[in-house]
Image (cartoon, rainbow, N blue to C red):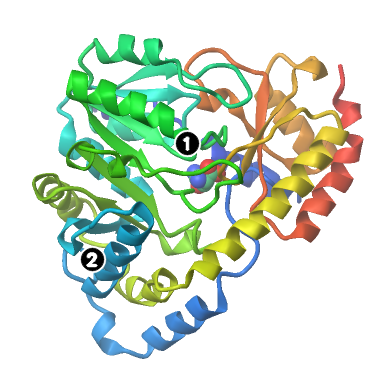
Amino acid sequence: MQNLSRRTENFSDSTIRRMTRIAAGYDAINLSQGFPDFPPPAELMQAMERVSHQPEYQQYAVLAGSPLLTAAIARKCSRFMGIDIPQEDVTMTCGSTEAMTSAIMAITDIGDTVVVFNPYYENYIAESRLCGAKALYVDLNRDSTFSLDAEKLEDALRQHPKALILNNPSNPCGKVFTYEELKTIAELVRKYDVYVITDETYEHIVYAPNRHTYFASLPGMYERTICCSSLSKSYSITGWRLGYTIARPEITDRIRKVHDFFTIGASHPLQVAAVTGLEMPQSYYDDLIRKYTAKRELLCSGLETLGLNPIWPQGSYFVMCDISSFGYESDMDFCVDMIEKVGVAAVPCSIFYNSPENRFIRFHFAKLDETLYAALDRLERIRILKK
Ligand code: GLN
């Protein structure tokens, strides 16, 4: 028989989801794959119930997504980004994963390159490969804020990439790009004529005094930016698979063509139910960040006490810990041992680097306080992993 595709030949399954499967086999507390174990806002659950009785929402939505939701996203994003977002620039997708893939496909041809900051969210590499594009890596500095090295970025941009992926706040390292860094990126992408594809999934999970700036809101940047985001984390509905792109009409037109043939559309009833989330008042977002600030404090200070050396994130609900003092050569072996012998699951960070890097593991803290306390309790035994 003929060979299967070269495009998929070197794909592994998602290590993040693999850790969840291994954790389940050992009944470990799962702080690997990032999703909440607490319920979404009650208003969203009620909206879902209401919509389930409305037959008009049980068939396909229009290609761009339910106009009720795209209008709500345009309103909400205009408010948060401080720029006027026309509803016509919004396209609903199946999670930000489809948003990113459609954006990459709308911009790149086979053989084009896409700049990715190192460490990166593992999906970007697979998404680029599916589009036939290659990643060009730019290391963030190895300091506690993963600061930007403008020279390294410029070196990469000199190689004529088509686009740059900007994950802000970043998964896995929790970096929030400063305004100054974003301005530097803006100057460089203008100079080298590069598109920017943002992933701003964690836009509402940013810890004071850090502040999130939407890249598209920088002067002149809207026209070369495809903003991708998701409702998963802002409203604790990862299973609803709702994401979106925002881009000027010429780019949106291409994204919709890809979207049409990939998935046709995201779930129509869930889109309608999600409008309730987008209409939440400011107090909802204040409350969300208050909750995550407390969870970050709880887990990170606990990890610190246990000698797990957390690098406190500036945003997102992930924290990277330095495990080099445990004497393991492989972070994967460490994570598997931690599941089996300690009963807590994390993600080996080697999957987020393109260079050999076995020093870090990633925990997430989108969990009930009691789950985090139980995990810390189990982690008291972490010393048994010392070699
Ligand atoms: N974004 C989440 C994480 O990084 C979930 C990813 C996934 O399911 N692969 O953990």
Res 120 visible: yes
**Label 2: few (<14), some (14–19) or many (≥20) C-alpha neighbours in 10 Å:** many
SS class, disc 2: loop
Residue at the location (72% across, 54% down)? 294
Residue at the location (48% across, 61% down)? 239
Q: Is residue 219 above or below residue 45?
A: above
Depth check: give the residue in front, 211 or 42. Answer: 211
The N terminus: image quadrant: top left
SS class, disc 1: loop
Q: Residue 348 at what x, y percent from top left? A: 63, 29
Q: Which mark is residue 65?
A: 2
Marks 1, 2: nearer the viewer: 2
Depth check: give the residue in front, 7 or 201. Answer: 201
Res 133 visible: no
Q: Is residue 293 above or below residue 308?
A: below
Residue that carries the numbered disc 1 in the rendered image: 13
Disc 1, ligand 1: is the CB inside 8 Å?
Answer: no
Tell whether 258 sits left or right of 368.
left
Q: Amino acid at mark 2?
A: Gly
Q: Is residue 34 above or below residue 149?
A: below
Depth check: give the residue in front, 344 or 368. Answer: 368
Q: Amino acid at mark 1?
A: Asp
Q: Is residue 60 above or below residue 339?
A: below
Q: Residue 351 at what x, y percent from top left? A: 53, 26
Tell whether 143 sits left or right of 244.
right
Q: Residue 376 at what x, y percent from top left? A: 84, 45
